[in-house]
Image (cartoon, rainbow, N blue to C red):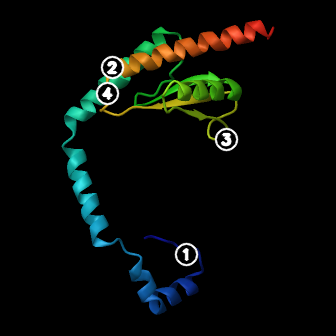
Amino acid sequence: MGAFVCCSETLKQYLVNRARTFIFSTALPPYVAAQLRATVGIVAAADSERSRLASLHAFLRGKLRDAGFETGRSDSQIVPVMLGSNERTVQFADALSQAGFAVRAIRPPTVPAGTSRLRLSLTAAMQLPMLERLVGAMISIREQLSASLCSTGL
């Protein structure tokens, strides 16, 4: 489903006029179009979920900022936690994974060097106690990493 050809105008005209079965075979199947239509209806009617999600991300950002974490300026359900170094970010992500949280380390080249971060993606189905546990785990991990740096003399 879907394709493109980078070509000259001559080749384009040839394909349009001679490869019609190929061109029309790449159209969306009717069931995909029906699913997309249903999805638009679901999304349009999800005002309460959007409101809940907004309150969850505001809650999480507030808790993280109160704990001394930098969460950037974004105001979406994707909450970045700026950690700076690649190594620290990977250590946080690994420790959070061991604690039961699926958190991704985002590093260069996806983001500029020195701005590695965790990406926390929220859904409206999440509950406040889970977010509180996440913040608690992050504080604990930060303390553990700081203690290990002190004990190695770094």
116 relative position to 120: left or right: right
First in sequence: mark 1 or mark 2?
1
Q: CA distance from mark 4 to mark 3?
A: 29 Å
Looking at the image, is mark 4 or mark 2 nearer the viewer? 2
Going by the numbered disc 4, the residue's amino acid type is Ala
Quadrant of the frame with the C terminus: top right
Residue under circle 3? Answer: 109
Q: CA distance from mark 3 to mark 1?
A: 28 Å
Helix, strand or loop at label 2? It is: helix
Q: Are marks 3 and 1 in contact (CB under 8 Å)?
A: no
User: Residue 5 has which mark?
Assistant: 1
Q: CA distance from mark 4 to mark 2?
A: 13 Å
In percent of width and height, residue 45 lies at 18, 43
Looking at the image, is mark 1 or mark 4 nearer the viewer? 4
Residue under circle 4? Answer: 54
77 relative position to 148: left or right: left
Going by the numbered disc 1, the residue's amino acid type is Val
First in sequence: mark 2 or mark 3?
3
Q: Place residue 26 in its image quadrant.
A: bottom left
Going by the numbered disc 2, the residue's amino acid type is Leu
Going by the numbered disc 3, the residue's amino acid type is Pro
First in sequence: mark 4 or mark 2?
4
User: Circle 3: is it few (<14), some (14-19), or many (20+) Cα within 10 Å?
Assistant: few
In percent of width and height, residue 150 lies at 74, 7
Residue under circle 2? Answer: 128
